[in-house]
Image (spheres, rainbow, N blue to C red):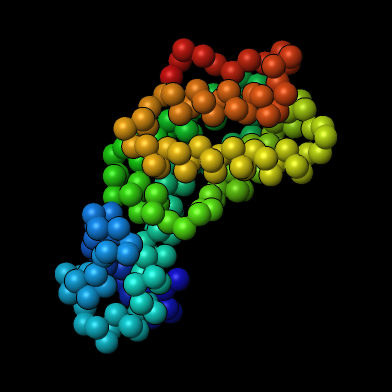
Amino acid sequence: MPLPRFDRLPVGTRAAILAVARAHFARDGKNAASFNQIIAEAGISKTSAYHYFDGKDDLFGAVVADAADRMFAALGPWIDVETEDELWEQVTAGTTRLMAHLRDHPDDRAVLAGRPRPGGDGGSWIHRLVANGLHINLIDPSPNAELITVATIGVFDALDTWALDHPSELDHSVTDTLTLFLTRLWNTAHGSGTPPQGER
């Protein structure tokens, strides 16, 4: 992660440096991107660059963290609901916003796809989703509620990785697939609630 001096730079200066680096990493990939070319284009000296970052890996980590922050801002917070239909609507809406963000910001998608695996985050959102699903009896807690949460995070991580690696397929099918996987994992097929279909 960035060194403390980077965090003390003005917000606009930090954003400009990360934007230049993001474009290079998205275009060339982490390994082929040139640290020297990035800092030259960003208008900072090599001495200053090493006051901000330990090197290219550190800069790449900062770019990924910045892209992830924007992605989770697009997702938005989980808001607890009272009905199964509301829960599925929120899952669908959040996933749709994420897919739209990745389509509209291909550099974010490219650097997130190039991050080390596993790279899933958003755990607090998923924890709140599962807790809400348990509270309204949508999710079958057996054999173990904690294990259900871990498995749900795994489903999101797997689908995130697939979506990042298949930019041409960032459409409603991702939401449909996520809904299908969660329905099976949570054992909701025999419940009263059904995931919304044909609305995406």
Let me know if residue 20 appears in the view: yes
Relative to residue 129, is residue 42 depicted above or below? below
Let me know if residue 12 appears in the view: no
Residue 161 picture location, percent across and down: 47, 43
How many numbered dots are placed on residues in this image? 0
Point 39% across, 79% down: residue? 54
Relative to residue 71, is residue 188 depicted above or below? above
The answer to whether residue 184 is left or right of residue 167 is right
Instruction: Give the quarter of the image for residue 9.
Output: bottom left
State the quadrant of the C terminus. top left
Residue 134 picture location, percent across and down: 75, 32
Relative to residue 67, is residue 167 depicted above or below? above
Q: Residue furthest right?
A: 143
Q: Residue furthest front?
A: 32
Point 54% across, 29% down: residue? 178
Instruction: Give the quarter of the image for residue 104.
Output: top left
* Closer-to-camera residue (53/155): 155
Point 63% across, 15% down: residue? 194
State the quadrant of the N terminus. bottom left
Point 73% across, 38% down: residue? 148
* Closer-to-camera residue (157/44): 157
Residue 187 picture location, percent across and down: 72, 23
Relative to residue 182, is residue 196 depicted above or below? above
* Closer-to-camera residue (125/79): 125
Residue 124 picture location, percent across and down: 61, 48
